[in-house]
Image (tube, rainbow, N blue to C red):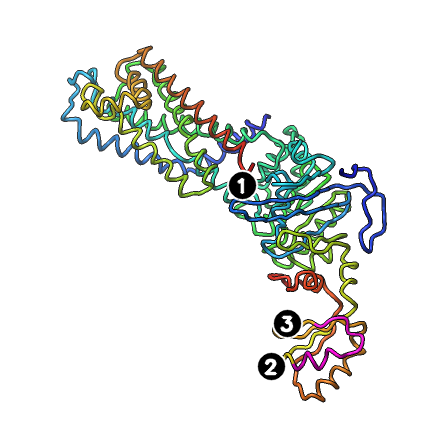
Amino acid sequence: MTEIALLGRRAVREVFRLPEATVPTLFIPLFFLAVNIGQVSKTFPSSTPFLHGQGYVGFQLPVSLMFAVCTATSGLALVTEIDGGYFDKLLVAPIRRSSIIFGRLGADLVRGVGTSTLVLLVGLALGARMRSGVAGALVLVILAALWGVAYAGIGLLVALRTRNVQATNASFLVFFPLLFLTPNFVPFDRLTPLMEGLARANPVSYVIEGLRSLVLQGWVPGKLAICCGVILVTGLLLTWLSVRAIEGYDR
Amino acid sequence: MHPSPAAQPAPRPGDRPNGRSHAIEARGLTRTFKGGIEAVRGIDLDVRAGEIFGFLGPNGAGKTTTVRMLSTLLPPTEGTARVAGVDVLADPAEVRRRIGVALQEIGLDPIQTGRELLELQCGLYGMGESQARARAQELLELVGLTEAADRRTKTYSGGMKRRLDLASALVHSPPVLFLDEPTTGLDPASRLTVWDEMRRINAAGTTVLLTTQYLEEADQLCDCIAIIDAGRIVAEGTPASLKAQIGHDVVSVSLDGADPRATRSTLEQLPNLERIVLEPEELLLYVDNGPALIPEIVRRLDREQLRVGAISVARPSLDDVFLQATGRRLEGAEEQP
């Protein structure tokens, strides 16, 4: 088995053995899903054009998915290993340092698929419908999980640079401005000009739009392509930075 | 120019040449951290293949930093080093294949079981799954952890963790093993178990570089010792040769309230006195034949009406070697059973 697979297996094992690291991260997405639906559904009934005949839950579901997958869990796991000394044990083994990163990202993919699936099921239970069908639901879960993998690079990078648990934990907060400067509550054309400008410049907006299209509209190739492109570029950039950070660790 | 691995190493005081090559060589090894902190200042090392080499010194002396440089975790600021015949800067990956490392902080994953951890370690060193399983079982039996093998390591005691950490450093039977303060924090029984493990590993041919702040550990285990203080090696040799440099006996006069200067001036005229050192609570006399001098010491003190506490005689210890080299005792050193 390759070193990435070995380290990935270890990290996945950690996900299942430490449910307390994953389960609490579901509180925010599910809380916001319930609260936002409760507060805004009357304002935007299903007859609202941008809802395409669905309840507001369909519009909010992708946002909750983003909340569910964007965590600092991997970064925290890494900084805990740095703190505890096991990281040195891995560095002194004859492996590529990048394997440590890729092993963690593999676990993030597994975790992301699990949490996305759970949030999707809750959304469906609350009345959302997948206009793109079962295949669309699978694509939705995978894309959300892949975005989580891409985003995990932030936590890993902060962990390697700071070697500090508090700083790594706080890196999760980077996501909040990124998430709220988007067509989070309403579409682009319902935002103020300033907000619309900021939202259109924010790549996270296009991930939300791509996921949302699967729920509300079915298969919209243009939106999906942009969504995939943003996930790919973000993932490549943050992963490259993380790999660079670990290669240069203590060197 | 560095000596080739096959060259005869220079004899050390008290040494008998045995034709062994170097397992670890370092020249001018230096590490300066940000802020100009010089943790290691130009260390030269020659560790012979097959020996247990001790690095003895107080906290902050540079022991761990030296180990981290030799094990490729930290690049030297200056200097060169070869471990198991390989340059640590030119080919660190190959060095890592040839060394095992157990650092001061026990490096275990608390979520994995002991068996899983060892099997992972075996896999990272290139073993297939069945080979890894067999090797892990072998090591678990060796370090006496078969019963706890399938429990998570966070449930292990300190001694168990240390034994597992040691086992994980041995999965690939490395020719060179680095142990950074392997018995710190262990109870006496666990400490002795680790000592036995080290002797067994060394008897099988592994070169061991051991850092410690425990005098007894260095004295008992090491073929050769380098005493390090403030980033520099201040003394080096076999334990016997280092102690022989001090003199034969150390007579300790516990002052117990007696005037230190008066006591010193009374005793500094003693015959065969090599050296006299005034410590805060005691006077140390380095003499040829301590027991024979006791009556004379008592007579002189009594004549001057100086009432001291206990008078004792001891052979020189490594602490005396450290004291001679640095002017102070090895701080933090503990007495061991």
Q: Which type of secondary structure does the marked residue at label 2 adopt?
A: loop
Can residue B146 be seen by looking at this rendering? no
Instruction: Please determine whether, in this image, residue B141 is positioned above or below residue B306.
Output: above
Q: Amino acid at mark 2?
A: Gly
On the image, numbered disc 2 is attached to which residue? B257
**Magenta range:** B262-276
Please give the label number shown on residue B279.
3
What separation in Å lies between label 3 and label 2 (alpha carbons)?
Answer: 13 Å
Nearer-N-terminus badge (3/2): 2
Q: Amino acid at mark 1?
A: Asp
Instruction: Please determine whether, in this image, residue A243 is positioned above or below residue B167.
Output: above
Q: Which type of secondary structure does the marked residue at label 1 adopt?
A: loop
Q: Are marks 2 and 1 in contact (CB under 8 Å)?
A: no
Residue A232 position within the rendered picture, expressed as x and y whole percent measured from the top left: 41, 19
On the image, numbered disc 1 is attached to which residue? B109
What's the chain of the residue with tag 3? B
Nearer-N-terminus badge (1/3): 1
